[in-house]
Amino acid sequence: MIDQRVGTDPEAIPAEIDRWNWGAFLLNWIWGVGNNTFIALLTLVPFVGLVMPFVLGAKGSRWAWRNGRWDSVAHFKRAQRLWAIWGAVIWLGAIALFGGIFGGTFYLLRYSEPYELGTSTLRASTEAADALGAPISTGFPMGSISTNGATGRAILSFSATGTKAAGGFSWRPSKRRTVVDHEAHAQSRRARWRD
């Protein structure tokens, strides 16, 4: 087989490609392996890895041009543009994924039955109203809720702010199975959150 690629002079860096390389900056060591620029593996070294993405962004185009076999400048630019697009897609996807996980967790805690029970208990408390001042507003909850069928436990804490002061509220309700008598006098089992 004959390699029909046009040879490029690795020492001569065309001015149009000697610029910031977003693919190298965003995908650092992955980009380095794909472009035969193995110095990018230094991003895996602690502390050095904090600086290397910036070095790769600044010098990556030069190194990739020297270490690769490119048909032309246009071929090089197309390849590096694809690296930059994939880097942006991966980073935006990761940010969206982690944002969704954290946002979803806060949303589920905020609209959970234990949190709503805790806020209503706090607002109904005359001691809390005397200490904080009415009306009392609450912040986002932190903690955990675990359920196992009809039983469960929650450990929540959130801020509480009134007209006089601000404070924190810790809430540890549990959910137990109780027997409730319905209108038809039939017995059924239902679970309720309690302090």
Image: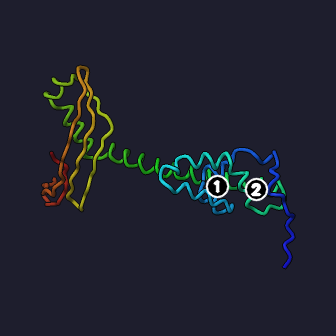
Q: Is residue 128 above or below residue 173?
A: above
Q: Position of residue 56 (x, y in %)?
A: 64, 50
- In this figure, which residue is indicated by the disc labeled 2? 65
* Image position of 103 (left or right of 77): left
Question: Which residue is denoted by mark 1 in the rendering?
Answer: 86
Q: Residue at x 18, y 32 (%)?
A: 124
Q: Where residue 155 sits in the image (x, y, percent)?
A: 23, 48
Residue density around tag 2, few if under 14, some if 14–19, many if 20 or more, within 10 Å: many
Q: Is residue 147 left or right of residue 93?
A: left
Type of amino acid at the residue the image marks with label 1: Trp
Residue farthest to the bottom, as pictured: 1
Left or right, 178 with respect to 146, comes to: left
Instruction: Classify mark 1: helix, strand or loop.
Output: helix
Amino acid type assigned to the residue bearing label 2 in the image: Trp
Q: Residue furthest front?
A: 11
Which residue is found at the position 58% from the left and 49% from the top?
A: 52
Spot the residue most to the top.
164
